[in-house]
Amino acid sequence: MANVDRDSRHLISKEDHEINPGSMNIQFDSSDLRSKRPFYIEPTNIVNVNDVIQRVSDHASAMNKRIHYYSRLTTPADKALVAPDHVVPTPGECYVYSPLGSAYKLQSYSEGHGKNNSLVTIFMIWNTMMGTSILSIPWGIKQAGFTTGMGVIVLMGLLTLYCCYRVVKSRTMICSLDTTSWEYPDVCRHYFGHFGQWSSLLFSLVSLIGAMIVYWVLMSNFLFNTGKFIFNFIHHINDTDSIPRTNNSNPVICPNAGSGGHPDNSSLIFFTNDTEVEQFAKWWNKSKTVPFYLIGLLLPLLNFKSPSFFSKFNILGTVSVLYLIFFVTLKAIRLGFHLEFHWLTPTEFFVPELRFQFPQLTGVLTLAFFIHNCIITLLKTNKNQENNVRDLCIAYMLVTITYLYIGFLVFASFPSPPLSKDCIEQNFLDNFPSSDILSFIGRIFLLFQMMTVYPLLGYLARVQLLGHVFGDIYPSIFHVLILNIIIVGAGVLMACFYPNIGGIIRYSGAACGLAFVFIYPSLIYIISLYQEERLTWPKLIFHMFIIILGLANLIVQFFM
C-alpha cells in the first residue's frame, strides 16, 4: 500500500501552476474531464510557447503508461476506473502527456480561446482531404468523358458527404453510453464487436499503405524528373524532340504515345553516341534505379520513434495545393481552351462525353473525398459544436470546387489538336517536359512535401498495427524495421513494375471506401434505427443501395 500511496500522491497537484501558458495549448471540453486520466507533471517538463520544448521526465512517462494500461482494461464508456469527481482537478490544473514527448496544458471551452473556430475547422478538413488524388483528377475526367466526369465529381462529393455526415452522427445514436471520447473504431466495435474493430483497422491500413505506395511512385517520378532537368540544363540537352509535343513557348508532351497507355519508365534520352549521356540514362532510370535511391534516404527516417520533426512541415501540403492551382490557372491562360462535344463517338483528338470507363474516376474520387476515419477527431476541435454539420458541408463544397477547378482547367486547356485528349497522364504533371520551369518548381515542392509526410504516414501505420497487435507502438527496433521494410518494399515494387498512380489510387480508394464510406456508416444507421424501432422501408432501401454502390465500385475496378 505504501507504494500505491507514493505513486498516486502526485497524480493531482493544486500547488503548481504554469506561468504564461501562451497559445500552445490543447483544448478539451470541460464536460469531457470524466473521460480523461490526468496526472502530475513537474513544471520543468511543461511546454511553454516561448521556451525550447523539453522532454517529459521518466516519472511522468511511466505514470502516463500506467494510466493508459488501466484505461485499456475497460471500454471508454466504462467509468469503473475513471478518477472520481472529488479528485479530478479543474481544467486549469490538468495536463496531458503527448505521444510526441511533451506535456500540454488543458483548458475548457468556456475560456473562449485556443479552440478552432469554424473557418479554421473548414480549412483543416479541406487541407486534410487534399492529397495526391488531385494529380489524377484530370486523367479520371478523361476516362469518364468531360461532361460525365464533371457530373460524377459532383455526385460523388454529395454521396461521400452524406456518408461522412452519418459517421459524425453515429456516436449520438448510442444513447445508453457516454460516447464523448469515442472515435469511429469505438463505434464500429460497439456495433460489430471485435470484427468491427479489426476490420476498421484493416481498411484503415489499406488507405495508409496505399497512400504510402502512391507517395513512393510519385517521389520516384519527381526525383527522376528533377535530376533530368538539372542534367539537361547543364548539358544543354532537349530530350522532347523524339516524342509528340506542341511546338510553342508552352510545350505540352504526350510521353506515352504508342505505348498502349502504360507509363514509359525510360529516361527518354536518345543520344547513343554520347558516353556521358548513356551513363546518366543507365544510372538515372525512373523504374530501375531511382526508386532504390529513395530507400537510403527514407527508410532510416521511418525508424524514428517520434515524427514530431516532420509534423512541422505540414504547411507544405497547403503550399503545394495552392501552387498547383496557380500552375494550372497560368497554363490554362497561356494555352487557351480546346473543347469539342461528341457524346458517344470518339474522334482523332477528342474523347466522347460519356465513356464506360467512368468507374475508374469513382475509384479515384472515393479516396479523393476520403476523410471518414478521422472526421470525428477533426470536428472535436471545433469551438462551436452545433456548427459541425454546416462546417462539414462547406468543407466538402470547397473540396469539390477545387477538384472541379483543377480537372476542368487541365482537361479543357490540353492542346487538342495537335495532341489527343487521350494523352492526359495519370499524373498530369507528366504532360509537361522536365525542362518546363513551372512544372520543375511544382515537382520540387511536391517532392519535399511528400518526403516529410511519408514518415508521418509510416508512423500512423506503425501506431495502428503494432499498437493493436503488441500493445506498444515501438516494441523493438527489429519489429519496426521489419514493418518498414515491408512497406518500403511494396512501394519500390510498385514504382518498378506498376507505376500507375491512377490505378493504385482507385484500387486502394475503392477498397478502404467500401468499409469506411459505404458499408459501416449505412449499416450502423440501419441497426440503430432498427433498435429504436424507427426503421422504415425507404430508409432501408436507400442505405442498402449505398452499400451495393460501394461493392460495385470495388468489383468493377478489376474489370477496367
Image (cartoon, rainbow, N blue to C red):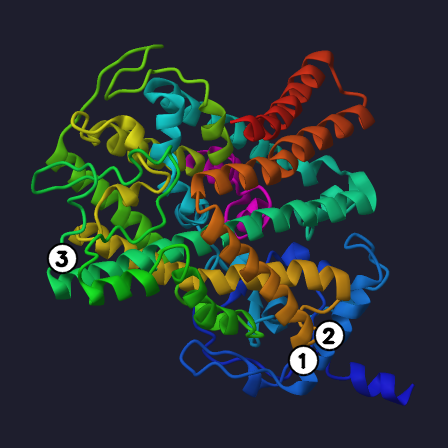
According to the image, label 3 marks what residue?
A: 237
The residue lying at 55 percent from left, 44 percent from top is: 385
Give the mark toward the camera: 2 or 3.
3
Between the residue at mark 1 and the residue at mark 3, the CA separation in whole angstroms equals 58 Å
| Quadrant of residue 228 within the rendered picture | bottom left
According to the image, label 2 marks what residue?
A: 65
Q: Quadrant of the N terminus?
A: bottom right
Work out whether 546 lies above or below 280.
above
The prevailing secondary structure element of the residues shown in magenta is helix
Density class for disc 1 (Cα within 10 Å; few <14, some 14-19, many ≥20) is some
Picture coordinates of residue 76, whole percent (x, y): 77, 55
Asked if one can make out residue 550 in the rendered structure from this viewpoint, the answer is yes
Query: Which range is magenta?
Result: 365-394
**Marks 1 and 3 in Cβ contact (< 8 Å):** no
Identify which amino acid the numbered label 2 is placed on: Lys
Residue furthest right as drawn: 1
Picture coordinates of residue 445, whole percent (x, y): 30, 58
